[in-house]
Image: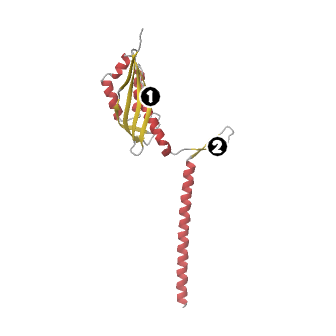
Amino acid sequence: MIIKNIEAKVRLATYVSAGAFILALLIVAMTLYFTSRELQKAQRSVYIIGSSGIPVAAKRSSMELNRPAEYRAHIAQFHSYFFTLAPDEKFIESQMDKAMYLIDESGALQYNNLREKGFFNSVLSSSSVLTLQTDSIVLDEKKHYFRFYGKQTIDRRSSTLVRSLVTEGYLRDLELRTENNAHGVLITRWKTLENNDLSHVQKNNF
């Protein structure tokens, strides 16, 4: 009888110890979970020192929420650099240099094709001013695919030409952001789908 009582007490002590150990593990796990959540919330907030010297909390949106806007800004910026030109050789070179930081070799390929066809020389010789209007940018985040719709105006001495512009490509995230690529994105597999005349107006030169 005594032995049975001892065995029962040992079992009870074992159960109590095991229960206490499991409870301690649960408390530690819950503490770590809630601490991690609070730390993530804190990292989404920044504090700005106001004019009174009192820190004011300001919410910082997560990268995931802001990424589509950055993608669109990157795409629009690249197209603006590539298709906005003036009859100035240094300006053209500057525009192309800035554009090439935002795209892979597919951009350099199109640039070289245009240069070989004498496109940039014609801009210089005809004193043309090229400007670009962005109409819309269709973005598929899952596939990292985009399609750009815009209009390019070519203003020459003798006429004004408006052309439709449709391009497509893919986006690749970069690990680092730089001064030349502030969005940390690289356009890849870029190509022009459409570049057709919409209107051609002759100027009256007296």
Q: Residue at x 44, y 28 (%)?
A: 133
Residue 133: which disc?
A: 1
Give whichever of 204, 71 is nearer the camera. Answer: 204
In front: label 1 or label 2: 1
The x, y position of residue 181, in whole percent, is 45, 35
In this view of the protein, can residue 200 be seen by the observer?
yes
Mark 1 surroundings within 10 Å by alpha-carbon count, few (fewer than 14), some (14 through 19), many (20 or more): some
Q: Residue at x 44, y 31 (%)?
A: 134
The x, y position of residue 43, in whole percent, is 55, 48
The x, y position of residue 112, in whole percent, is 32, 28
Three-letter residue code for mark 2: Val
Judge from the rendering whether residue 95 lies leftward or rightward of residue 106; answer left or right. right
Residue 56: which disc?
A: 2
Q: Residue at x 30, y 24 (%)?
A: 116
- Distance between mark 1 and mark 2 Cα atoms: 39 Å
Give whichever of 116, 151 is nearer the camera. Answer: 151
Residue 9: which disc?
A: none
- Most extreme residue toward the top is 206
The x, y position of residue 175, in whole percent, is 43, 43
Give whichever of 108, 82 is nearer the camera. Answer: 82
Three-letter residue code for mark 1: Gln
Q: Quadrant of residue 198?
A: top left
Give the answer, above or below, for where 86 lies relative to 181: above
Give the answer, above or below, for where 124 lies relative to 23: above
Quarter in which the C terminus is drawn: top left
Q: Secondary structure at mark 1?
A: strand
Q: Quadrant of residue 164?
A: top left
Judge from the rendering whether residue 31 lies leftward or rightward of residue 127; answer left or right. right
